[in-house]
């Protein structure tokens, strides 16, 4: 039975999946994947020591000027991420030439 046929459930979500194209060297695919992972995550928070012993934990997050305060708005769009070349051993690589994009239905847990 398909999950979206069950009354009251929303339509299934779709995941965008990037896979290396045939002939893409593994080191190039790994470099692109690493860059996409770093650029699509929110900036890390640095742990700071408590002001007083036993005091609350503190953290510091540094973001570029003009970054929206809403964390959901800071995630770059896929088209923007894929438009930037990545430096690999043989020179710049264009992600769309090395990766294929497909949509796959998500599985509910």
Image: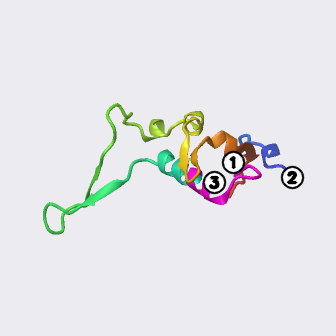
| Residues at marks 1 and 2 touching, judged by CB atoms closer than 8 Å | no
Q: Which residue is mark 2?
A: 1
Marks 2 and 3, how far apart in space?
36 Å
Name the residue located 30 percent from the left edge and 45 percent from the top edge: 62
The residue under the point 54% across, 37% down is: 84
Residue 71 is one of the magenta-drawn residues: no
The number of numbered badges drawn on the structure is 3
Assign the C terminus to one quadrant of the image. Answer: bottom right
Q: Residue furthest right?
A: 1
Is residue 104 shown left or right of residue 60?
A: right
Mark 2 falls on what kind of element?
loop
Which residue, given by chain and number where applicable, does mark 3 sit on?
29
Residue 43 in picture, x, y percent from top left: 39, 48
Q: Nearer the viewer, mark 1 or mark 2?
A: 1
Q: Which residues are the magenta region?
A: 19-32
Camera-nearest label, 3 or 1: 3
Q: Residues under labels 3 and 1: Cα distance?
A: 14 Å
Judge the density around disc 2: few (<14), some (14-19), many (≥20) Cα neighbours within 10 Å: few
Residue 38 at x, y percent in the picture: 48, 51
């Amino acid at each position: 039975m398909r999950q979206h046929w069950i009354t009251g459930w929303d339509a299934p979500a779709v995941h965008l999946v990037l896979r290396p194209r045939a002939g893409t060297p593994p080191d190039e695919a790994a470099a692109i994947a690493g860059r996409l992972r770093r650029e699509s995550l929110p900036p890390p928070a640095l742990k700071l020591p408590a002001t007083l012993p036993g005091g609350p934990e503190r953290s510091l997050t540094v973001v570029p000027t003009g970054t929206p305060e809403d964390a959901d708005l800071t995630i770059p769009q896929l088209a923007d991420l894929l438009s930037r070349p990545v430096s690999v051993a043989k020179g710049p690589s264009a992600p769309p030439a090395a990766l294929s994009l497909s949509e796959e239905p998500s599985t509910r847990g």
